């Protein structure tokens, strides 16, 4: 859905779209995590992230004026701020004309070589065989779309509110609040994938078979019959539309949002759907591309509508026109094929003493020699 992403190119939101079309509810779709520190120079197509421990160890960021700008966004943690704050700070430099080659400068001169190599093995694994010393070249970082925090509304067993439909991992929502912590993605898949598998097996063993509605099967059979070629190629119009879609979502649904920008994103989705309707689908590749664009329109609408409804800034959702966190918005936004709804989040007694907005705590072990940290 975005032009710069850590996700494989074939990940197009199909899980969310399938669940919505089937009648299940999605939750928290406005919360999209952008990873702040992707090295875009010296790398282009290869994804090489800078690890968060780099900034605990002394990494610094500078804009084209040589300003250490993160001090404005978090005077205490500075470059070691949370991901949402760091992504917004870097994005601000880019959109206000203070970028360097499309990003900001990463200065690692304060970090011992041994420590940088431990924390950022991928950087040195790519550069060392080419005889390139990372300390002698410019390092430029920029944000990338990284993780969808929202997803299918599930219970503790991975059950959606649609009988027989289960979700886990990044297809599910509600596990990570509004801003996923580093390294929680893989345990999420293991815990809830395991629970969902056990419960789904029990359901399959006890559920009574129900008659299937044949109309969707007939619909997809007709679309397959209409394809005259099994080749995977597509006409340029499909690639142009995907690029148009990514740019439109980046502008309207990206790191910094406004009501006007979100409404424009929804308008653009309507335009994309109309342009897609006018494209001839003649190959299997074009059918796949059209389905992926349709899915991204469904998901983009859910995200933009949720973000438009939440008139505040919280966690990974930042509204420039509503920059303050509003206590009245401690609630979850849900969306299904019938529309939008909200429900309050009630804290239990054991949570009463928790701060309303806890700050990030740096892991002291992450910057110690011999310790490794990996991004998910």
Image (tube, rainbow, N blue to C red):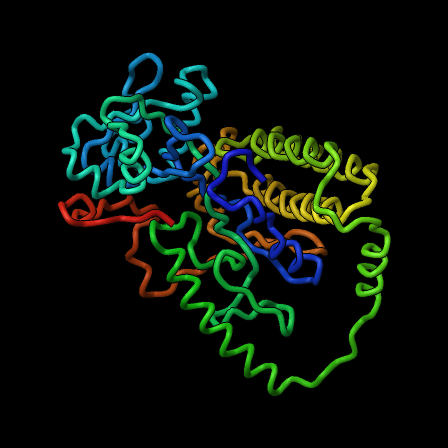
Judge left or right: residue 229 versus residue 11.
Answer: right
Does residue 65 lie above or below 375 as drawn? above
The percent coordinates of residue 351 (x first, y second) are 33, 61
Does residue 223 lie above or below 261 as drawn? below
Judge by depth and name the residue closer to the eye, 31 or 348: 31
Instruction: Let me know if residue 21 appears in the view.
Output: yes
The percent coordinates of residue 27 (x first, y second) are 56, 55
Judge left or right: residue 239 versus residue 82.
Answer: right
Judge left or right: residue 49 versus residue 154.
Answer: left
Instruction: Let me know if residue 344 appears in the view.
Output: no
The percent coordinates of residue 239 (x first, y second) are 68, 34
Judge by depth and name the residue closer to the eye, 207 or 303: 207
The answer to which image quadrant residue 338 occupies is bottom right
Does residue 13 lie above or below 242 as drawn? below
Does residue 132 lie above or below 375 as drawn? above
The answer to which image quadrant residue 219 occupies is bottom right
Q: Quarter holding the N terminus? A: top right
Judge by depth and name the residue closer to the eye, 156 or 39: 39
Q: Residue furthest top?
A: 65
Q: Write the residue at 73% across / 39% down.
A: 234
Q: Write the residue at 50% across / 52% down.
A: 331
The answer to which image quadrant residue 71 occupies is top left
The percent coordinates of residue 155 (x first, y second) are 51, 69
Q: How many labels does the image show?
A: 0
Q: Write the residue at 52% across / 78% down.
A: 199
């Amino acid at each position: 859905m975005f032009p710069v992403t850590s996700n494989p190119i074939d990940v197009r939101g199909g899980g969310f779209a399938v669940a919505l079309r089937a009648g299940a509810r999605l939750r928290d779709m406005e919360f999209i995590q952008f990873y702040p520190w992707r090295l875009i120079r010296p790398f282009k197509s290869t994804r090489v992230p800078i690890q968060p421990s780099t900034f605990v160890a002394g990494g610094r960021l500078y804009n084209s004026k040589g300003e250490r700008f993160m001090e404005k966004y978090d005077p205490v943690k500075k470059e070691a701020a949370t991901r949402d704050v760091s992504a917004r700070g870097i994005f601000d430099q880019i959109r206000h004309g203070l970028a360097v080659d499309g990003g900001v400068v990463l200065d690692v001169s304060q970090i011992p070589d041994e420590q940088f190599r431990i924390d950022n093995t991928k950087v040195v694994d790519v550069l060392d065989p080419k005889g390139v010393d990372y300390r002698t070249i410019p390092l430029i970082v920029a944000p990338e779309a990284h993780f969808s925090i929202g997803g299918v509304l599930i219970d503790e067993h991975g059950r959606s509110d649609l009988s027989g439909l289960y979700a886990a991992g990044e297809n599910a929502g509600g596990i990570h609040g509004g801003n996923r912590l580093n390294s929680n993605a893989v345990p999420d898949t293991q815990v809830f994938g395991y629970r969902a598998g056990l419960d789904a097996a029990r359901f399959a063993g006890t559920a009574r078979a129900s008659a299937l509605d044949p109309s969707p099967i007939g619909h997809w059979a007709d679309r397959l019959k209409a394809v005259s070629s099994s080749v995977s190629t597509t006409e340029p119009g499909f690639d142009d539309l995907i690029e148009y879609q990514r740019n439109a979502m980046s502008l309207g649904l990206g790191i910094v949002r406004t009501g006007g920008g979100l409404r424009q994103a929804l308008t653009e989705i309507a335009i994309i759907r109309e342009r897609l309707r006018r494209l001839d689908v003649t190959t299997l590749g074009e059918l796949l591309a059209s389905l992926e664009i349709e899915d991204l329109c469904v998901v983009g609408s859910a995200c933009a509508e949720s973000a438009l409804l939440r008139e505040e800034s919280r966690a990974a959702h930042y509204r420039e026109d509503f920059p303050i966190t509003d206590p009245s918005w401690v609630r979850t936004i849900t969306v299904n094929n019938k529309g939008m709804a909200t429900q309050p989040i009630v804290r239990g007694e054991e949570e009463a003493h928790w701060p309303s907005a806890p700050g990030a705590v740096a892991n002291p072990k992450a910057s110690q020699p011999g310790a490794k940290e990996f991004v998910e």
